[in-house]
Amino acid sequence: MRAIASFWAQALDDVGADHFFHLGECVAEDSVSVRQSIVSRVAETLKKGRRYYCKDNVLLAADRSSFVTEVPMIERDPRGRVSPIVCYGSFDSIKEDGFADCLCEEIETFAVSIGQSVAPETLDLVREAFNILKKKQLRRKAAQLSAILLVTIVLLAIGYWVVMKKL
């Protein structure tokens, strides 16, 4: 499966540059536009989107076109604060089979690349979050299809009534 997300994590030492990956590639410190684009997309999704999951510092928010998930790392910053990995991706990729497992692999790869780690239980929560989101999306689509079907039936009934009235 192709790379499906962009990642961002703050440097734990409060001095170094933040870490960014975009679609499987490390983003260089001098690639300011790519870094700003990722941060802007994360902020926009969190602002416009809805929170679908929040448990043990794992957060999942999504709007109609993208998702953001925050995943806490095991390591803490010098002040003892939890530092999350922020993942941003296209909503279309959620539909792919094995999406949550692939995302968890990418999260682990990113964490290791920046010298950090994520607890297996935390990755289980990420899988749970995306399963909940998928179910809610399926219910929403079913409701939309039901509404379309109802409107179609009403229009056909009106059309039938008009034709029968003319006869």
Image: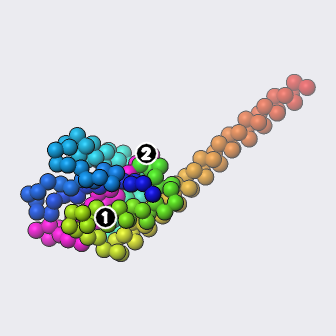
Count residues near mark 2 (Cα–Cα under 10 Å), then give few for <14, some for 14-19, many for 20+.
Answer: few
Q: Considering depth in this image, is 3 or 67 the residue closer to the camera?
A: 3
Q: Residue at x 19, y 42 (%)?
A: 32
**Residue 3 at x, y = what percent?**
39, 54
Residue 45, horizontal then vertical, whole percent: 35, 47
Q: Residue furthest right?
A: 167
The residue range painted magenta reads 63-89
Residue 105 makes an appearance in the image: yes
Left of 76 or right of it: where is 104?
right
Left or right of 14: which side holds 123?
A: right
Query: Observer-nearest residue: 164 or 118?
Result: 118
Q: Position of residue 52 (x, y in %)?
A: 41, 58
Q: Nearer the viewer, mark 2 or mark 1?
A: 1
Q: Residue at x 45, y 57 (%)?
A: 1
Question: Label 1: which residue?
Answer: 109
**Which residue position holds label 2?**
65
